[in-house]
Image (cartoon, rainbow, N blue to C red):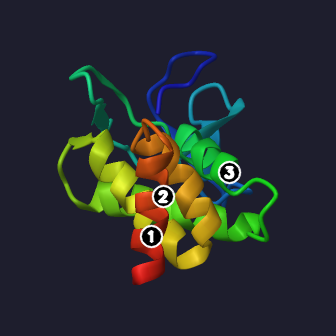
Amino acid sequence: MKCPYCEFEESKVVDSRPTDEGEAIRRRRECLECGKRFTTYEKVESIPLMVIKKDGSRQMFDSQKLLNGIVRACEKRPVAMKDIERITFDIESTIQNNLQREVSSDKIGEMVMDRLKELDEVSYVRFASVYRQFKDVNTFVEEVNRLLNK
């Protein structure tokens, strides 16, 4: 690691500990040339994941956007935030572990609906109404009937 003060390329690690979130390791280093100390962070390199939208455009996967959509569907429902965060984490992990660098928004939407159906049926219908773009009341009723028949 190059020293930010004198640019010498060798240093020793004086202290090492995980960050508060546990996502990285904080290392306190000391330059072997000038003796000054500096901090570095080590974290797992993530490969960007692209989402293919319905119109064919691509954008970077954003777990915050996924979380916000699920939160919106669960508003004023007895759904704990930890359950919403768990769904978001599970979906992101599933996508990352798939080892494909592109995923369709349809696939993500289906994954959300599968999990919401088990968690809270009203939240599921809310999400489905936006995701499936219900055109009228009949399509909405059909989805509710499908849910009731299972």
Residue 27 visible, this orientation: no
Q: Position of residue 125 (x, y in %)?
A: 54, 59
Residue 28 visible, this orientation: yes
Q: Distance between the residues labelled 2 and 3?
A: 23 Å
In this figure, which residue is indicated by the disc labeled 3? 71
Q: Position of residue 72 (x, y in %)?
A: 68, 46
Q: Which of 78 and 20 is in front in this view?
A: 78
- Category of crowding for the residue at label 1, using alpha-carbon neighbours closer than 10 angstroms: few (below 14), some (14–19), many (at least 20): few
Is label 2 in a helix, a strand or a loop? helix
In this figure, which residue is indicated by the disc labeled 2? 141
- Category of crowding for the residue at label 2, using alpha-carbon neighbours closer than 10 angstroms: few (below 14), some (14–19), many (at least 20): few
Is label 1 in a helix, a strand or a loop? helix
Asked if the residue under mark 1 is in contact with the one under mark 2, i.e. CB atoms within 8 Å, the reply is yes
Q: Which of marks 1 and 3 is in front?
A: 1
In this figure, which residue is indicated by the disc labeled 1? 145
* Rendered residue at 39%/71% (across/down): 146
Q: Quadrant of residue 19?
A: bottom right
* Rendered residue at 59%/41% (across/down): 64
Q: Distance between the residues labelled 2 and 1?
A: 6 Å
**134 w.r.t. 18: above or below:** above
Going by the numbered disc 2, the residue's amino acid type is: Val
Q: Which residue lies furthest to the front in this view?
A: 138
**33 w.r.t. 106: above or below:** above
